[in-house]
Image (tube, rainbow, N blue to C red):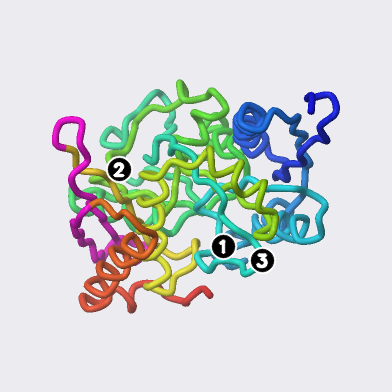
Amino acid sequence: MSEQQAPALRLGTRRSKLAMAQSGHVAEAVRRVTGRPVELVEITTYGDTSREHLAQIGGTGVFVAALRDALLRGEVDFAVHSLKDLPTAQHPDLVLAAVPVREDARDVLVARDGLRFDELPEGARVGTGSPRRMAQLNAYARSHGRTIETVPIRGNIDTRVGYVQSGELDAVVLAAAGLNRIDRIDEVTDFLSVDTVLPAPGQGALAVECAADNADLVAALAELDDPFTRAAVTAERSLLAALEAGCSAPVGALADLQADGQIAKEMRLRGVVGTTDGSTLVQLSTTGPVPETHDQAMALGRELAAEMLAKGAAGLMGERAH
């Protein structure tokens, strides 16, 4: 069947500039593997229209529910999410068909006057909508005998960077992956080391989801899957689930491969949970063989979560988000 005859695949995406950019990348890859045209179907989610802070509206799933509803109603064939927005519980009628190669997982600073984090003035106002970032940035500042004021903000990248440009804030913290995907990485004034700020579980990775009963599409989308990225984010999300925390909880996690030359020998999983003022952090890591199955990756996350809970992590997360 020629591409002209093949019906277009409908890709459900949020309307934001970032979502459209990352969905466009996936659409191009799907065109290559299927030979079929792909059209973007823009869907507005509750998380896009609500002006409340993410921690107040629950975080988990607020950007995902409308896309999933469209999938279940057959209005779109597949959907692309930022993986960190996806609830950790698998939907019974949907399948995570592909997790493509991960972008840069780090958080970054966009500050006035080109300042790095260590150059910010005492009491600098730093904007972020993430309790996870607040906890770690405040803890880092405290450990260096400094204070910053973390200011909760919402909005797209333009809005957030605008707070710095207008002088309302000294800096904002964003995900490197988002700025990379919309070609604005040159605005970054400091890349925050994962030793300073662990990213959100799944940060920098995309989730390609479709109906579980569409076997042909599941098989086609699987061509986009990167097994190492999938193993890493599975371990990170397993940690999050075992801590019973939603994506608005102050939990950071990162799994990375420990390579010996070109051969990946082990996977290290690091996790952190803390109070947003940075006064208390529980930060631990574990290392194991590179997971070869979903269950092995899940086990790595549960193991580290159990150690963190034993060290008092549960008491640091405030409201449990389910």
Residue bearing mark 3 = 93
Decide which of tag 1 and tag 2 comes sooner along the chain. 1
Magenta highlight range: 260-289
Decide: few, some or many residues near mark 3? Use Cα within 10 Å; few <14, some 14-19, many ≥20: few
Q: Indicate whether residue 281 is drawn in magenta.
A: yes
Decide which of tag 2 and tag 3 comes sooner along the chain. 3
Residue 296 drawn above or below residue 1: below
Whole-number angstrom distance, CA of label 2 to CA of label 3: 51 Å
Which quadrant of the view contains residue 102? top left
Whole-number angstrom distance, CA of label 1 to CA of label 2: 31 Å
Whole-number angstrom distance, CA of label 1 to CA of label 3: 22 Å
Residue name at image x 44 percent, y 28 percent: 112
Q: Amino acid at mark 2?
A: Glu
Is residue 32 or residue 190 the one in the foreground? 32
Q: Which mark is residue 59?
A: 1
Q: Which element type, helix, strand or loop, lies under badge 3?
A: loop
